[in-house]
Amino acid sequence: MSLPQLVVYRHDRRKRALITLAGEIDLESAPLVGTALERCLHDDMRTIDVDLTPVTFCDCSGLNAFLHAAQQTTVAGGTLRLHHPPPMLALVVGLAGCGFLLLGLPSGHLPPPLGDTLAAPSPGPPHESVPHAPVLSGDVR
């Protein structure tokens, strides 16, 4: 049995959800991301923080899933923020000009260049450290 490509962890506190994604986000696993974020809205969560610290890869299909979820969250009167994106995703978000939507950056602000160790880290999710138990995982073939 192979390990799941992506695992989704969720911790709720009132109307706020912390989603932690672990693994790779690509064309095959991006629908899992969308499903997890849609469930938050369905469960009346209006602030969604996505911790990407354990994500090892995220391509443009992952970015698309995040943008769609951010749009749906905004329509529902909430906010969605990505925290600690992998360097390549942060760069693509900045180049696409959507950092203000996903990272809470000022409009037009580019994230620091890859490998810039002096850059300030993105703010962490507001939840305390909690043990993770997967709520969704994808082993897509």
Image (cartoon, rainbow, N blue to C red):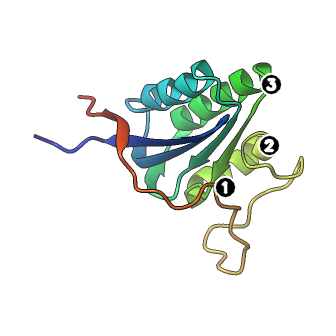
> Separation of disc 3 and disc 2 at Cα?
22 Å
Q: Who's the residue at 68% across and 69% down the image?
A: 121
Q: Amino acid at mark 2?
A: Gly
> Separation of disc 2 and disc 1 at Cα?
25 Å
How far from the left and from the top, in percent, is residue 49? 64, 45
Crowd rating for badge 2 (residues with CA inside 10 Å; few <14, some 14–19, many 20+) = some
Helix, strand, or loop for circle 2?
Answer: loop
Helix, strand, or loop for circle 3?
Answer: loop
Q: Tag 2 or tag 3, which sits nearer the N-term? A: 3
Mark 3 and mark 2 in contact? Answer it, CB < 8 Å: no
Residue pointed to by mark 1? 126
Q: Nearer the viewer, residue 138 or 119?
A: 138
Query: Tag on residue 77?
Result: 3
Crowd rating for badge 1 (residues with CA inside 10 Å; few <14, some 14–19, many 20+) = few
The answer to whether residue 111 is left or right of residue 115 is right
Residue pointed to by mark 2? 97
Q: Nearer the viewer, residue 122 or 130?
A: 130
Q: Who's the residue at 40% across and 56% down the image?
A: 131
